[in-house]
Structures are given as C-alpha cells and as structure tokens.
Image (tube, rainbow, N blue to C red):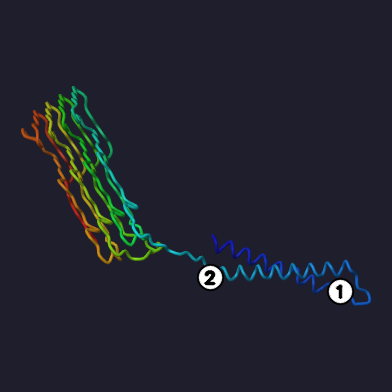
Amino acid sequence: MQIGKAGVVAAGALATVAVMGSAATAAPAAGPAHADPVRTAATTLKQAAVQQAAGQALAAVQNVARGPQREVRQPLISIANGSALTTGAWQACGSASAQVVSAAVALRSPNTVLGDCANGNVLIRQNQVQGVISILDDTSVNALPIQVCGSNAAIAGVTAAVSSPATVVGDCFNANTYIVEPKEGAQKGPQSLVSLLSGSVVNAAAVQVCGSTASIVGVAAAVQSPTTVLGDCYNSNSTIQKRKDPAVIPLLSNQVLDILPLQTCASSGLLGQLGPALPIGSSAFVGGQCVSGGQKILD
C-alpha cells in the first residue's frame, strides 16, 4: 500500500509539472517596456509552484526506490512471549462423569455427541524476534488437562450409570500441542545468546478416558451402559518444528517434557486408575486409534 500511494503522488506531481510547465512556456513574454506588475507576480508564483511540484515528485520517486526502512530491535530479556499457559482444562464430552468431590447418577439417560471432542489443545507459531536471553518464549505449559470422552468416569468423585450408553461419533483430542517454525518471509531478528525452554512443550498429568469405564481417585459403576467412540483417541501428543536459527546456547529449547500422560482407551475393569471401576454388561469400544504421549521434533 505504501508503494502504491507513493506512485500516485509521484504521478500526480509530474502531471502538475507537465501542465504548469506548458502553461508557463505558452505565456507571452513581456518586454521591459510593457511590464505588467500583476502579470509578473502571477508568473513568479507559477514558477514557484512548478519548482515545488517537481521537488515533491522527485522525493516521492526516491521513496519508492528506497522502500520502507524498518529497524529490528532485540530486547535484552524476553520471558514467555508468544507462549500459552493452560491450567485445569477439564472436559466431559458425551459422558457420565463426576469430578472433584461430586456424584453423577445417570438412569436411562444416554449421552451422545455426533462430532468431535477437543480439550486443552495448543497451536503456537514461533516468533522471529527473541531477547538476547530468551526464557519460555513460544512455549506451551499445560497442567492437568483432563478429558472424559464417550465414557463413564469418576475423577475424585462417584459415577453411576444405569442403561445410559455414552457415545461419541467423532474423535477425542486432549492436550495435543503443535509448535510450528516462524512464518516464511517474516521479519527476522538477531539470534539469541541463551534460550531456556523456548519453543518447547511442558505437559503435566494429561489424562484422557476415551470409550471406557474408569475411575481416577474415585468410583465408577456402569450397568448396561456401553461406552463407544467411533473415531480416534489422541492424548498429549506433541509436534515441534525446530527453529532454523536456535540460540548460541539452547537449553531445553524445542523439546518436549511430558510428565505422566495417562490414557484409558476402550477399557473396563474391576480396578481402574487409582480407584475401582465396576462395569456390568457395559462394553467398551473405540473404532479408531488410541495414541497417548507421542512426540515429534522435526528439523
């Protein structure tokens, strides 16, 4: 837009030069004997206007040739710029679920979701300009993301489901992270001297109960209540595209720290996760994949 505007100014100014110059040339010359003060003053003003227009046109053309000049300034220290902090993202989707000192009772109450269930997922595009010392820039920190998807589950509570199927037709995504490299052609800043946990993933206790009857520090009981997910179950999977110009001293940068990723997928049993699960006549089915704690770091 800047170049376009400058071009218009230049064209307009040059047109002014052409028109006014022609008018000045066509004006009849007046000899000293017949000098008219009014005409002399008008001619002087006209010549001044022509010179001003020419100067403006020249300046506009020079600006177009040079283009915009922008200076990139690097901060001394940058902390958590472009980062994501997620704490306690909990989702019960197409499920009967009790969470945190509570009780849930489902009696002939089916739970159905015809689409996907997504909880605590993060997408970050890394920034080009980081500090001389970069700490936790372009980083995802996700603490205790919990998803109950197409399931009967108890999270520090009690759940009872009787003749209440839980069904999700789509996929279940929990705490998956994608950190991509800086945008191609983006303005590039100076390289950092030291980076600590920049462009990284830190997941703590990502829990997913998918197409299952399970308890996590609680009690889950299901009677004639099948759990079904027709898609995939993805929990705490991370993909990172590494920066092409990492810091001189990169410390745990573009890395994945995944602490206790926990997934119950198409499972039922008398002993769940840190608590009893009692499925009676309650089948568990997942039509797709069960993937938890996967990591990809791409150069």
Most distant residue in the left direction = 270
Q: Amino acid at mark 1?
A: Pro
Horizontal and vertical percent for residue 63?
57, 68
Q: Nearer the viewer, mark 1 or mark 2?
A: 2
| Residue annotated with mark 1 | 28
Q: Is residue 211 above or below residue 73?
A: above
- Mark carried by residue 66: 2
Q: Quadrant of the C terminus?
A: bottom left
Question: Residue 36: x and y, percent?
Answer: 90, 70
The circle drawn on residue 198 is: none
Q: State whether residue 97 appears in this view.
A: no
**Crowd class of label 1 (few under 14; some 14 to 19; many from 20; radius 10 Å):** few
Residue 189 lies, with reference to residue 235, above or below; the image says below
Marks 1 and 2, the one that precedes in the sequence: 1
The amino acid type found where label 2 is placed reads Arg
Residue 283, horizontal then vertical, whole percent: 11, 33
Question: Is residue 261 visible in this depiction of the protein?
Answer: yes
Question: In the rendered view, does 80 fall on the left or right side of 66?
Answer: left
At x 26%, y 34%, the residue is 113
In front here: 25 or 205? 205
Under circle 1, the secondary element is: loop
Which sits in the foreground, 132 or 243?
132
